[in-house]
Amino acid sequence: MSTILNMKVLIVEDETPAAEKLERYLQKYSTGITVIEKTGSIEETSSWLKAHQAEVDLIFMDIQLKDGLSFQIFQEVKVVKPVIFITAYNEFALDAFKVNGIDYLLKPVTFTDLSASLKKLESLSEQLRWSDAKAEKVVSTFTETPAVSYKNRFMVKLGDHIRSITSDQISFFFADGRDVYLITHQQRKFIIDYTLENLDEVLDPKIFYRVNRSYILNISAIQDVIVYSNSRLKITSNIKWEDEIIVSREKVSEFKEWFDGVH
């Protein structure tokens, strides 16, 4: 029986729903696959690998974690296990991963893509073996990779027409139920095929910030910030908007740092 169907997996992902979905897909692919740990940061993953790397057969690793890019892990720990990267980045950096024999999954991850990736590993002549030299080559490749490229325009539909909206034209994104909308500085409203979680990964964090579960704001769209009840903040946007935009209490400190240019 293939070792792919009976293996232990580490998932490195800072979004709990995404990690849980990946685990469900792995179980669907084979009940012999066991996720023995989920980590969500560079620090936590590095510590876990230093102590437990021998226990794992395969690693699924999101590129962008809450404390930075996951490639830093390779600088802190000699990773000798195969890694499948999960990314929402443009493909300019992905060719390097392919040269080094590392597969990748684009977000949002589908079961079909996951299955293809695992089948690719099954077909390798030396299954689930990855040399130190290859790991070091990945680190070297990363240091030579250009800076991350963030999404700067979105395609929208207007009747029978298709338009491109650049990020500097956007005041904010907001979620209403399962739908996510893009709102321009001219108060035009367009539905887009993204979740706020997807947008968090592809937008420039220096320009856009997710203030709560429903809104991601462009800093240029913030007209005023008012101290609100229960230690929260109320934001007035540069357009007329009926609903209140409130910075959730747990995000107030981080928002102030972002607003001050710390992040």
Image (cartoon, rainbow, N blue to C red):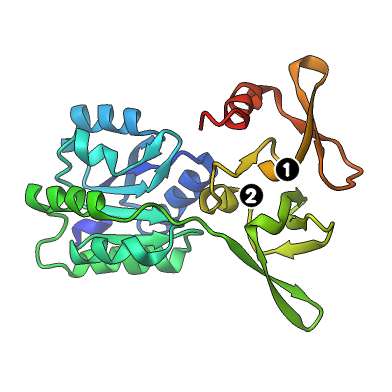
Residue drawn where x is 19% and y is 29% of the image? 50
Give the structural element (helix, strand or loop) at label 1: loop
User: Which sits earlier in the primary sequence, circle 2 or circle 1?
Assistant: 2
**At 50% across and 47% down in the image, what residue appears?**
18
Q: Which residue bears the numbered disc 1?
A: 214
Give the residue at x 33% y 28%: 43
Q: Position of residue 243 (x, y in %)?
A: 88, 41
- What x and y, as percent, mark residue 35? 35, 42
The amino acid sitting under disc 1 is: Ser
Using the numbered discs, state the Cα–Cα distance from disc 2 to disc 1 in whole angstroms: 8 Å
Which amino acid lies under the numbered mark 2 shown in the image of this protein?
Leu
Residue 182 in view: yes
What SS does tag 2 mark? helix
* 10 Å crowding of disc 2: few (<14), some (14-19), many (20+): some
Residue situated furthest top in the rendering: 230
Q: Which residue is mark 2?
A: 196
Image height of 141 relative to 160, above or below: above
Left or right: 255, with 65 as reference point: right
Let me know if residue 7 appears in the view. no
Tell me if mark 1 has few (under 14), some (14-19) or many (20+) residues whose alpha carbon lies within 10 angstroms of its own. Answer: some
In this orientation, which residue lies closer to the viewer: 143 or 27?
Answer: 143
> From the viewer's perspective, is residue 208 above or below residue 189?
above
Closer-to-camera residue (188/37): 188
Q: Position of residue 162 (x, y in %)?
A: 71, 78
**Residue 169 location (% of width, % of height):** 71, 58
Q: Quadrant of residue 123?
A: bottom left
Marks 2 and 1 in Cβ contact (< 8 Å): yes
Q: In the image, 55: left or right of 85?
A: left
Q: Seen in the image, is 176 located left or right of residue 254?
A: right
Q: Quadrant of the N terminus?
A: bottom left
What's the residue at 56%, 53% (across, down)?
A: 198
